[in-house]
Image: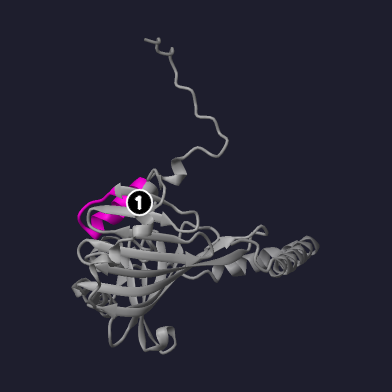
Amino acid sequence: MSAMGWVRHIFLWRPLLLAVALGLFLSANVNAEQQNPKAAKSAKAKKKKAAPAAVEPVLEAKAIEILKEASSRLAAAKTLSFTAVATHESPSRFGLPLLYAVKGDVILQRPDKLRVISSGDGRVFEFYYNGKTMMAYAPVENFVAVADAPPTIDAMLGEAHRLAAISFPFADMIASDPFKGLEPDLKVAFYVGQSKVIGGTTTDIVAIGTDKAFGQVWIGADDHLPRMVRLVYLDDPAALRFQVEYSNWDLDRTFPPDAFESAKAAAAPHIPFNRPDLQPMTGQKPKAKKGKPAKAK
C-alpha cells in the first residue's frame, strides 16, 4: 500500500527539446552502425563485457540497527505530528518524466486517531479517523464519504485501501511497528554514509531493497527520525522515482479532542465510500445482467 511496505503539461518545451536531442543522438548511432557494422558489433561486445556483476543480497548489522532505532522512536510516541511532501515522476506526452508533488500535514494519536490535510498538484483532500468512522472530504467540491472503521490505525489503513483505494505515502511511518512491516520483504540493507544536507541536520543514509523496489532512507543521526525516503520500483521499465520528504516532526504533544473531527466535513453532502478504479466511466452504460428479466408482481 505504501512505499516499500514501509497538474499536467508543465514546462513542455523542456521535455520536447530533450526528446528532439535524444532522437538526433539515436539517429546518429544508427547511421554509424550502418556505415561500419563491424565496429558496431565490437562496441556492443565491449558494453556486454563491462556490465556490472549482480549484487548479492546483504543485510548489514549497522543498517538494520539504524532502521530499528527509527522504528522504535516512532512506535514509542503516543502522538505524532509531521509534514510529508511526496513527489513522484510520471511520463509526459513525450515519454520523458514530469514531477508531481503532494503535501500532507499529519497528526495522529495512538492507537485510533488520524487526521491528514493534503494539498498539492491535484485535488485538495482531507481525511479524518476517530476510531469508529473514517471520513474522506473534498473541501473544494464539498462532498464527503463516510464509512465505519476498525479500532486501530493499522487496521484502518488496510480497510481504507480496500474500500476506496485510499493509501498514504507515509503509511509506514504511522504504523504501530514500522520495521516489522518492512522486515519480511527486506533483501538488501547497507550503510551508505552521512549527509548534512537533507532535513537541515546530520542524517545516516541506509540503502534498502526488496524484490520489488530499491532505494535510500535518510534518518536523523541524533533523533532517529526519518527525513527522506527515495525509491525506484524494479518492475518499472522507465525507472521512475518516488520520494517522500519529512519535516516538522513533533512527538508526544497533546491534541484537543476535536482535532480528529470536522463539523464542516460531516455536514457536507455524502457520496458512497467506493473504489474509483472499480467505477464505470462517465457515460458508460452498466452491463445488462444475463438471463430473463423477472416478472412484475
Q: Is residue 23 above or below residue 132?
A: below
Question: Please, what is the three-letter code of the amino acid marked with disc 1?
Answer: His
Q: Which of these two is toward me, 248 or 272?
A: 272
Q: In the rendering, at what x and y percent does residue 151 appear?
A: 20, 55
Q: Is residue 130 above or below residue 196?
A: above
Q: Is residue 5 left or right of residue 271?
A: left
Query: Which quarter of the picture shows residue 201?
Result: bottom left
- Residue drawn 32% across and 72% down? 189
- Residue drawn 31% across and 70% down? 107
- Residue drawn 22% across and 76% down? 254
Quadrant for the N terminus, please. bottom left
- Residue drawn 38% across and 61% down? 168
Q: Secondary structure at mark 1?
A: helix
Q: In the rendering, at what x and y percent does residue 24 appear?
A: 77, 66
Residue 218 appears in the picture as rendered: no
Q: In the rendering, at what x and y percent does residue 214 appear?
A: 41, 67
Query: Which quarter of the picture shows residue 10?
Result: bottom right
Q: Is residue 270 above or below residue 205?
A: above
Tag 1: Cα neighbours inside 10 Å, few (<14), some, or many (≥20)? some
Q: Is residue 12 left or right of residue 275?
A: right
Q: Main secondary structure of the magenta part?
A: helix
Q: In the rendering, at what x and y percent does residue 72 appear?
A: 21, 74
Q: Is residue 238 left or right of residue 10?
A: left
Q: Which residue is mark 1?
A: 161
Residue 163 appears in the picture as rendered: yes
Query: Which quarter of the picture shows residue 7?
Result: bottom right
Magenta extent: 148-163
**Is residue 13 found inside the magenta-colored segment of the image?**
no
Quadrant for the C terminus, please. top left
